[in-house]
Image (tube, grey):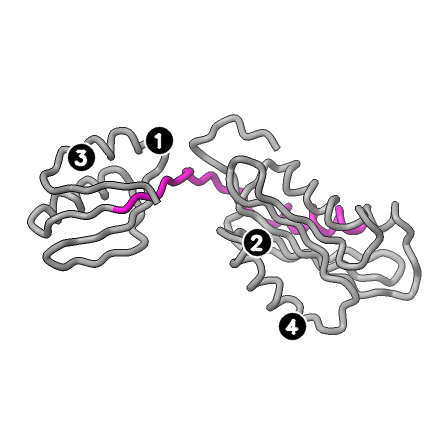
Amino acid sequence: MTNKNTDFYQTLEKESFAEFKDRGSRFLGYAFPILSAVDFKKRLKELKEAHPKAVHHCFAYRIGTDGNNFRSSDDGEPSGSAGRPILGQIDSKELSNTAIVVVRYFGGTLLGVPGLINAYKTAASFALQLNPIIKKPVLVNYRLQFDYTILNDVMRIIKKNDCIISKQDLQLFCIIEASIPRTNVELCVLQLKDLKSMELSTI
C-alpha cells in the first residue's frame, strides 16, 4: 500500500452492505471503518452471531498508515481464495482503518479457486462502491499535565489546533489526553510548552 501523504489517510464513512450470487452461493459483503483490531473482532463476532448458518466468514482489514498492520482470513476456504482478494480491494482504494467481512452461504455447487477469488473480490468491491470514502487527519496522542489556573489557555490552544480530547481529569492539577492532527503538532506543542507548569508527553 502506498500512502504518499503521511498527514492524512483515507477510510470509509460508515458501514455498507452488498450481495453477490454465483451458482446458488450467496456472498454478503460488509465494509466498515475501524480504529483497532478490538473494534474489528467485536463487529466480526456480531456478524457471526447474525449469520450462524453461513459456512464461511472471510475477512481482511488494514489499520494505521505505515502499511504493516493488516490481516486476512480464508476461514476454511482454499488458501488465498478469499482473504487476499478482499484485502486487495481495500488496498486498491488505498484505504486504512478499514475492514471487510464477506459471509458465504453455500449453494451446493463448488466454484473452484478462480470462482471463489472472483466471488469474494466482487462482494468486497460491491460493498466498497456503496460507501463514501473520506479523508481523515493522522493523529498523534499526547498527555498534558498542568495546573488548573491555565485550563482556559490550554482549552483555547486545543480548540485552535483541532485536537480531540479522549480523556480528561480536571482537578486542581489537571490531566488531559488529546490527539493532535500531525499537521498541527509542531505549532500546538510549542504553544502548550509556552504555558507555565505544563508537562507534555507522547502516549
Mark 2 Cα shell of 10 Å, populated few (<14), some (14-19), many (≥20) = many
Residue 69: percent from left, percent from top: 57, 43
Residue 117: percent from left, percent from top: 81, 47
Real-space Cα distance between discs 4 and 2? Answer: 17 Å
Q: Magenta part of the protein: which range? A: 119-143
Question: Looking at the rendering, which quadrant does residue 75 occupy?
Answer: bottom right
* Residue linked to disc 1: 183
Residue 39: percent from left, percent from top: 52, 58
Mark 1 Cα shell of 10 Å, populated few (<14), some (14-19), many (≥20) = some
Q: Earlier in the sequence, mark 4 or mark 2?
A: 2
> Looking at the image, which residue is at 51% across and 42% down?
64
Give amino acid for label 1: Thr
Seen in the picture, residue 112 relative to 137 is either above or below; the reply is: below
Q: Is residue 113 left or right of residue 177?
A: right
* Residue linked to disc 4: 49
* Residue linked to disc 3: 193
Front: mark 2 or 1: 1
Mark 1 falls on what kind of element? helix
Front: mark 3 or 4: 3
Give amino acid for label 3: Lys
Real-space Cα distance between discs 3 and 2? Answer: 38 Å
Seen in the picture, residue 49 relative to 194 is either above or below; the reply is: below
Give amino acid for label 2: Phe
Mark 3 falls on what kind of element? helix
Residue 132 shown in magenta: yes
Mark 3 Cα shell of 10 Å, populated few (<14), some (14-19), many (≥20) = some
* Residue linked to disc 2: 32
Q: Earlier in the sequence, mark 1 or mark 3?
A: 1
Q: Is residue 36 left or right of residue 173?
A: right
